[in-house]
């Protein structure tokens, strides 16, 4: 096991890469602990926490709502959880985002930690202290910054993860490589087959290197005043596709990264070879790189982006692979690039 730390203003977080779900009791405080998990994870791994009160939620983005949060609050009251209680979220990004928000707001905040069970959650969603739910059609519109006390990344759990979900995790790993780690990009290029086959050593390195990048960025800019925005590479367009084309998050951001790379090339920041290198790596990871969707619907979805300031959208571009920068891009410019996909 390797441990990485985040020293945030909202708390101190230990990311335990390679720790086992079966050891979670080592990290929770004495006293009441309630597990929040989803149907799939509970049926596969529920045996690991039979001694605890468990709150099971449904699956998919559709459950990431205030209604689910309210249902969980009701259960916490029923289980007589007070301010000394602890919430352990065991699941993917959806469970982590919801249970982090629940723990941050129930009785003005109780202690919490995660066992992240998807590759995407291990390399991204469970790390960094952002939590929340969707609201009124907007993703992650309501939430807080608050660090989990610990995150257990147990890569053995990935064996049961559907392949499409594994690939989504590669989307975020590739993102970390593109925005800040050329060596990780090289490693992915050389080891994509082993990665897809979930080779234990390769996955261990990919998860660890990703968490190094993410935790480093979060340590420098916890509340997304500047540098943390780089982690949104591929996400402005990605979120628009995710909503309108019904793709999974990692698939949508793969296409979003191609758009952002092309935009970077148009701005003279990225060479044609580097754009091709990005596309080729995403294809090697069997992620989608283009989409057959109504361009007007996509542009409209981006217009509604909550990160938009006036006529410009804050866009993360690449000034060469491994070096992200943030630039305001007008809707008119975006329309041109999206039209030429
Ligand atoms: N807070 C953040 O910083 C952050 C960052 C990135 C993404 N996110 C959020 O994360 C969410 C996506 O997370 P996700 O991709 O983990 O999706 P998810 O939580 O929906 O999990 C994907 C599917 O895999 C199942 N599953 C989970 N673990 C499993 C296992 N070990 N074996 C078999 N099946 C398993 C789940 O039940 C679900 O059906 C999105 O809502 C996104 O907005 C948050
Ligand atoms: Zn993402």
Image (cartoon, rainbow, N blue to C red):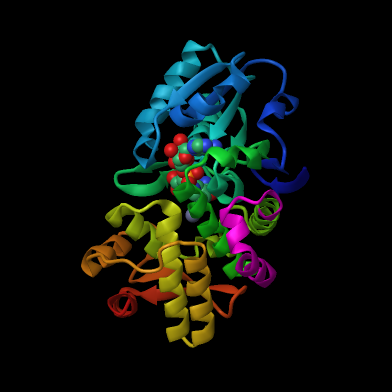
Q: Residue at x 71, y 52 (%)?
A: 201
Q: Nearer the viewer, residue 151 or 221?
A: 151
Image quadrant in which you'd find residue 237: bottom left
Q: Residue at x 31, y 53 (%)?
A: 243
Q: Whole-percent x and y of residue 185?
A: 63, 69
Q: Whole-percent x and y of residue 3?
A: 76, 45
Q: Whole-percent x and y of residue 29?
A: 72, 22
Q: Residue at x 31, y 52 (%)?
A: 246
Compared with 199, 91 (above or below) is above
Instruction: Give left or right: position of 293 versus 327.
Output: left
For this orientation, the residue located farthest to the right is: 2
Q: Magenta span covers which residues?
A: 181-202
Compared with 55, 12 (above or below) is below
Compared with 186, 102 (above or below) is above
Q: Nearer the viewer, residue 304 or 200?
A: 200
Image quadrant in which you'd find residue 335: bottom left
Image quadrant in which you'd find residue 288: bottom left
Compared with 117, 57 (above or below) is above
Q: Residue at x 70, y 55 (%)?
A: 205
């Amino acid at each position: 096991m390797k441990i990485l730390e985040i020293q945030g203003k909202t708390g101190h977080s230990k990311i335990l890469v390679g720790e086992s779900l079966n050891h979670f009791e080592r990290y929770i405080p004495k006293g009441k602990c309630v597990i929040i998990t989803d149907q799939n994870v509970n049926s596969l791994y529920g045996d690991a926490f039979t001694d605890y009160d468990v709150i099971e939620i449904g699956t998919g983005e559709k459950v990431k709502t205030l209604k689910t949060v309210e249902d969980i609050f009701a259960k916490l009251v029923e289980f007589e959880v007070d301010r000394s209680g602890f919430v352990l979220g065991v699941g993917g990004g959806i469970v982590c985002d919801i249970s982090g928000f629940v723990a941050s707001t129930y009785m003005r905040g109780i202690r919490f930690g995660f066992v992240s069970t998807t590759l995407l959650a291990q390399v991204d969603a469970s790390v960094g202290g952002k939590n929340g739910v969707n609201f009124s059609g907007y993703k992650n519109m309501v939430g807080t910054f608050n660090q989990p006390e610990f995150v257990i990344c147990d890569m053995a759990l990935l064996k049961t993860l559907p392949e499409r979900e594994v690939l989504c995790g590669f989307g975020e790993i590739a993102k970390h490589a593109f925005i800040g780690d050329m060596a990780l990009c090289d490693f992915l290029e050389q080891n994509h087959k082993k990665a897809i086959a979930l080779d234990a050593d390769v996955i261990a390195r990919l998860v660890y290197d990703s968490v190094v990048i993410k935790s480093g960025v979060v340590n420098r800019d916890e509340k997304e005043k500047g540098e943390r925005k780089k982690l949104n590479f591929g996400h402005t367009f990605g979120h628009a596709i995710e909503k309108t084309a019904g793709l999974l998050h990692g698939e949508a951001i793969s296409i979003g990264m191609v758009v952002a790379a092309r935009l970077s090339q148009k701005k003279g920041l990225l060479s044609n070879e580097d754009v091709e290198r990005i596309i080729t790596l995403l294809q090697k990871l069997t992620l989608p790189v283009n989409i057959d969707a109504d361009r007007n619907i996509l542009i409209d979805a981006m217009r509604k982006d909550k990160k938009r300031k006036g006529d410009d959208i804050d866009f993360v571009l690449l000034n060469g692979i491994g070096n992200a920068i943030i630039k305001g891009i007008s809707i008119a410019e975006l329309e041109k690039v999206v039209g030429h996909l």
